[in-house]
Amino acid sequence: MSEQQELDTDIQEAREEFLGVEFDSVEFDLQPSHTIKYATLCGETQERFLDENHPDFQAPPTFVASLSGGRYLPEGYPRFGGVSMDAGKGVESLEPIRPPLKLIGKSHIHDIFTKTGRSGRMVFTVTRLEFYTEDGIHVANSDSRQVSRERG
Amino acid sequence: MAKEKLSDVEFGEELSAFEPDTTLATGAEFADLVGWIREDGAKNRFNSHEAAKKEGLPGAFIPGILSQGYLVSMIHQWAPPAEIKKVDTVFRSPVIADVKHSITGVVTDIDEDEGLVEIDLTVVNDKGETRIFGTASVRLPQ
């Protein structure tokens, strides 16, 4: 087996053990004043994000990116040998989020993949926080990507 | 002119440039709002240039998720009824507080069947250096 195949084996094992397995659940209490301030600081100008009496009042779509679970990674998740850094964030809006309301955030590892550069292998871990209303409606996803850069 | 419906949008068109508020005061207020400042107000990389420099950083950071919020606000100014379906950002380098930045955007795809527009977004500093890349998928009325 080549070195690359051996390296990929650890990724395959991590994928089999961790992908899609919920490891954290947190409840969030969203208040209009909080999301309005968030929208204001982001430079939002549309009244549906700024006026809680607006008929289409909702939190700004990226608000969920500010909510984090109790744990970022599951217990026993491998370190992949390098220092971990923030590689980016993504938000998917499925339904408008209209405060005041409670959201339940459920975390799982959504993807693990590698890229190999001149300085060695980089392992990317995507943690997805899925948000649901108390009625079980899936309203948004927030992805955080971390990269561990291994020494070549 | 603000875009109200999908047919107002042209492939390759550029969004009006947006200058976000990257002052230290705003970045610090935002960091406090999202819980990144301790209750005792201790100085850190989001509310103090000096504290950031002690960490070996060039200056205080604007939180990445605030920059993400700027991208969305820019889209809403360009097309007020736009529904953001997805936005993805890659933090290439920090956005330093109290440095002027600008955001540009360009329409890279229009899906007339789904009513979706794809937009590439870039945050650059006053030296023209790219700090953040972003892509967004937005829905506009047909």
Image (cartoon, grey):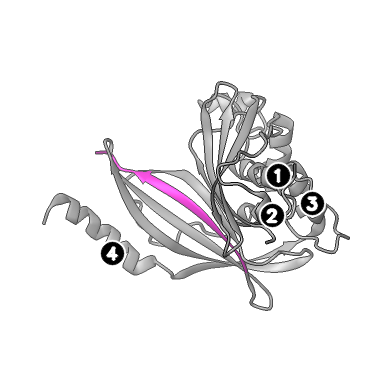
Quadrant of image for the N terminus of chain B = top right
**How far is the residue under mark 3 from the one under mark 4?**
44 Å
Residue B19 position (above or below residue A88): above
The residue type indicated by label 2 comes to Ala
> What percent of the width, then of the height, locates residue A14?
32, 62
- Of tags 1 and 3, the one toward the viewer is 1
Q: Would you say residue A66 sits in the magenta stretch? A: no
Residue wearing tag 3: A36
First along the sequence among labels 3 and 4? 4
Q: Secondary structure at mark 2?
A: loop
Q: Are marks 1 and 4 on the same chain?
A: no
Considering every residue shown, the one lying at the far bottom of the view is A135
Q: Are marks 1 and 2 in contact (CB under 8 Å)?
A: yes
Magenta residues, start to end: A139-152
Give residue B78's mark.
Answer: 1
Q: Label 4: which residue?
A: A13
Q: In whole angstroms, how far apart are the C-alphas of marks 3 and 2? A: 18 Å
Q: Please give the chain letter of the residue carrying mark 4.
A: A
Please tell me which residue lies in front, B109 or B46.
B109
Can residue B76 be spotted in the picture?
A: yes
Q: To which chain does the residue with label 2 belong?
A: B
Residue visible at 58% across and 64% down?
A: B114
Which mark, residue A123?
Answer: none
SS type, badge 3: helix
Q: Nearer the viewer, mark 1 or mark 4?
A: 1
Of the numbered discs in the image, which one, if any, rests on residue B82?
Answer: 2
Quadrant occupied by the C terminus of chain B? bottom right
